[in-house]
Amino acid sequence: MKVSCLQENLAHGLSIVSRAVAPRSTLPVLSNILVATDNGRLRLSATNLELGISYWIGAKIEEDGSTTVPARTFVDLVNTLPSDTVSMELTIRNQTLNVRCGSFNNDIKCIDAQDFPPLPPSELDDGLTLNVENLRSMIQQATFAASTDDARPVLTGVLLEVEDDQTTMAAADGFRLSVRTAQLSSASSNQVRAIIPARALSELARIIGTGDETISMTLPANRGQVIFRGTDFELVSQLIDGTFPDYHSIIPTTFATRSVLSTGALLKACRAADIFAREAAHSARLRITPGSDLEPGTMEVSATAAETGSNETIVDATIEGEAVEIAFNVRFLVDVLSVIDTPNVAIETTSASSPGVVRPVGRDDFLHVIMPMHLGR
């Protein structure tokens, strides 16, 4: 293999694929990044057997070939090289990759590419076409609610459902639930129901962060995998086996009180309350008071800590229904308000012991359910 490419392109590609490198593995090759020529471009790939990421960069190919390079050494080296052309040449006999850039000359000991896990076939049919903007937004508004506790693996994933021309992502951790829907550009002939690891979707959102093209999603039959493909990248993830809870039964269908208020003002109030709520399992009290003909309604967000002190913030609100007092994990409120992009937000409550529902005002494609906490005295 003999190739050359720009240092900034190589560094960017390595920063993307290196996130799939296995930090500790009994297989040494999983700590390496595959570097291979592929139809006139350079392919960089890494996998931990659960998540695999490939990224293609433009390169001048003089001789085809492939090898696997120790990830940490390669990434650190490329990041220190000057912004110039990087030339790489592999000596197959001893699997040594010579990396030159400007006055820098380096030899890296590699592992044969034949030891690297096989990559998915390049041609896969029956893929769904997803709009990048919708996909990024869906991932952002769903994955944060997934569990980080491996005791219930199903809840560490995001349920993806596709039916006709609608796709839905749902995530829950036992204390909160996020549901985000979007319309597909064309109806799907197949129904899809799969649980994708939240981490894989977060990495996907990071890769497509600045893209504006469409993404292809494929679920190969009997492989237990999902494959996302873009112009310059491919992400492969194992699916999570199991049955996702019936989240529809968790969503309240009625409410006694609906409060509409500024998203930004409520987010600031919740962040302030969280400073004092840390000692009390992040519990904050919401005291909702309807207004009158002369005065607006209010939502008072408060938190008390035995050692730190107390905090109260009053936010003006338009309130339909009766007064109510309820406690939530304020960290959960901060999380959901941070991903809502509408100026105003609605909070629907029924009683101190019933779940609350958070919705962006003016959009019906997202909702978030939060379980209440015990109201202390």
Image (cartoon, rainbow, N blue to C red):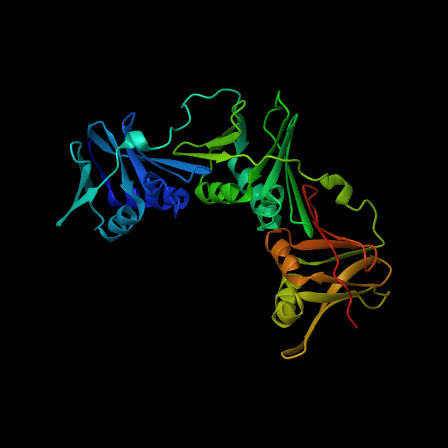
Horizontally, residue 39 falls left or right of residue 347, namely: left
Q: Residue furthest left?
A: 103
Residue 14 occupies quadrant:
top left
Residue 239 in sight from this viewpoint: yes
Horizontally, residue 205 falls left or right of residue 377, namely: left
Q: Position of residue 68 (x, y in %)?
A: 28, 37
Q: Residue at x 27, y 46 (%)?
A: 74
Tag count = 0
Horizontally, residue 208 falls left or right of residue 361, namely: left
Vertical placement of residue 340 versus 271, above or below: above
Residue nearest the viewer, comparing 290 with 125: 125
Q: Position of residue 40 (x, y in %)?
A: 27, 27
Residue 241 occupies quadrant:
top right
Residue nearest the viewer, comparing 377 with 216: 377
Vertical placement of residue 60 versus 172, above or below: above
Residue nearest the viewer, comparing 52 with 142: 52
Q: Position of residue 6 (x, y in %)?
A: 24, 41
Q: Residue at x 53, y 27 (%)?
A: 219
Q: On the rendered image, what quadrant is the C terminus found in?
A: bottom right
Q: Position of residue 252 (x, y in %)?
A: 79, 46
Q: Residue at x 82, y 68 (%)?
A: 295
Vertical placement of residue 236 versus 346, above or below: above
Q: Residue at x 51, y 34 (%)?
A: 238
Q: On the rendered image, what quadrant is the N terminus found in?
A: top left
Vertical placement of residue 282 versus 177, above or below: below
Residue 210 in sight from this viewpoint: no
